[in-house]
Image (tube, helix red, strand yellow):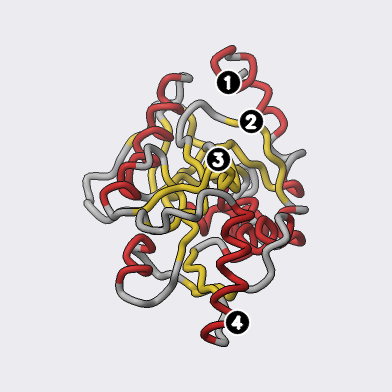
């Protein structure tokens, strides 16, 4: 339908719960389906609004191709995306939830490695002694590459992580990791430590808009931002 506004919300976890609460606090009550695995919802008294639950990363993709009009996802996932995708999306507002840091973490027993400069020394040492590069496990290759290069670290290779990145140094798949963390507890529990200058990105949940849909949803956005909670 031409006038329907399609909104992407995270499909699971705390980000989903916080996004639903955020909408409801601003007068948009989400009506959930009784079906456990239903990925669609509506908003009470707003027949022109349609909710689709998607993986937070896919929300960025669908905003970029115009399938979604607006959505809530993480700044980390937006910044990790390719530039041509980011150019098609507007960050309308940073929201007060979903806060986390993308960091460089090393094993606790690397007592001589406290900063990125120390890490650069280690990477050259590994290269000279083993003829291999320092392996960095990550789900964020673009942000990790940009950060390490900006700090002058070059002797490394990225290891794509499919999950539980914290385990990689201890199963022999990498030496160090970069990962997103909200409290740091999971890193500590897995005998990892964040470098003193190892923060890559301070992330938060954001309200994103598909750039080519801005005219279509302009009236809706004005209604939202008349409610001061959105500001």
Of marks 3 and 2, the one in the foreground? 3
- What residue sits right under mark 2 in the picture? 93
Question: Along the polypeptide, which appears first: circle 4 or circle 3?
Answer: 4
Q: Secondary structure at mark 2?
A: strand
- What residue sits right under mark 1 in the picture? 230
Q: Residue at x 23, y 51 (%)?
A: 35
Does residue 82 sit above or below 94 in this rendering? below
Could you say where residue 1 lies in the image, as x and y percent from the top left?
59, 50
Please tell me which residue lies in front, 54 or 126.
126
Q: Secondary structure at mark 1?
A: helix
Q: CA distance from mark 3 to mark 2?
A: 13 Å
Question: Along the polypeptide, which appears first: circle 1 or circle 3?
Answer: 3
Circle 4 crowding by C-alpha within 10 Å: few under 14, some 14–19, many from 20:
few
Could you say where residue 9 lies in the image, as x and y percent from the top left?
46, 44
- What residue sits right under mark 3 in the picture? 203
Evaluate if marks 1 and 2 touch, with contact meaning CB atoms under 8 Å apart.
yes
Does residue 24 sit above or below 144 in this rendering? above
Circle 2 crowding by C-alpha within 10 Å: few under 14, some 14–19, many from 20:
some
Evaluate if marks 1 and 4 touch, with contact meaning CB atoms under 8 Å apart.
no
């Amino acid at each position: 339908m031409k006038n329907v506004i399609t909104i992407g919300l995270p499909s699971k976890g705390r980000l989903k719960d916080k996004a639903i609460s955020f909408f409801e606090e601003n007068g948009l009550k989400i009506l959930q389906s009784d079906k456990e695995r239903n990925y669609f919802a509506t908003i009470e008294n707003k027949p022109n609004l349609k909710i689709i639950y998607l993986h937070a990363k896919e929300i960025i993709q669908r905003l970029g191709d115009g399938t979604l009009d607006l959505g809530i996802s993480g700044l980390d996932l937006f910044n990790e995306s390719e530039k041509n995708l980011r150019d098609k999306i507007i960050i309308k507002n940073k929201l007060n939830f979903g806060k986390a840091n993308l960091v460089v973490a090393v094993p606790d027993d690397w007592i001589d490695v406290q900063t990125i400069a120390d890490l650069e020394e280690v990477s050259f040492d590994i290269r000279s002694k083993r003829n291999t590069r320092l392996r960095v496990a990550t789900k964020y290759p673009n942000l990790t590459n940009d950060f390490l290069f900006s700090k002058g670290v070059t002797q490394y290779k990225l290891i794509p992580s499919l999950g539980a990145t914290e385990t990689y140094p201890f199963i022999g798949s990498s030496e160090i990791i970069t990962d997103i963390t909200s409290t740091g507890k999971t890193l500590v529990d897995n005998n990892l430590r964040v470098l003193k200058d190892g923060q890559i990105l301070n992330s938060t949940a954001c309200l994103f808009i598909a750039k080519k849909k801005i005219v279509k949803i302009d009236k809706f956005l004005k209604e939202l931002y008349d409610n001061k909670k959105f500001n």
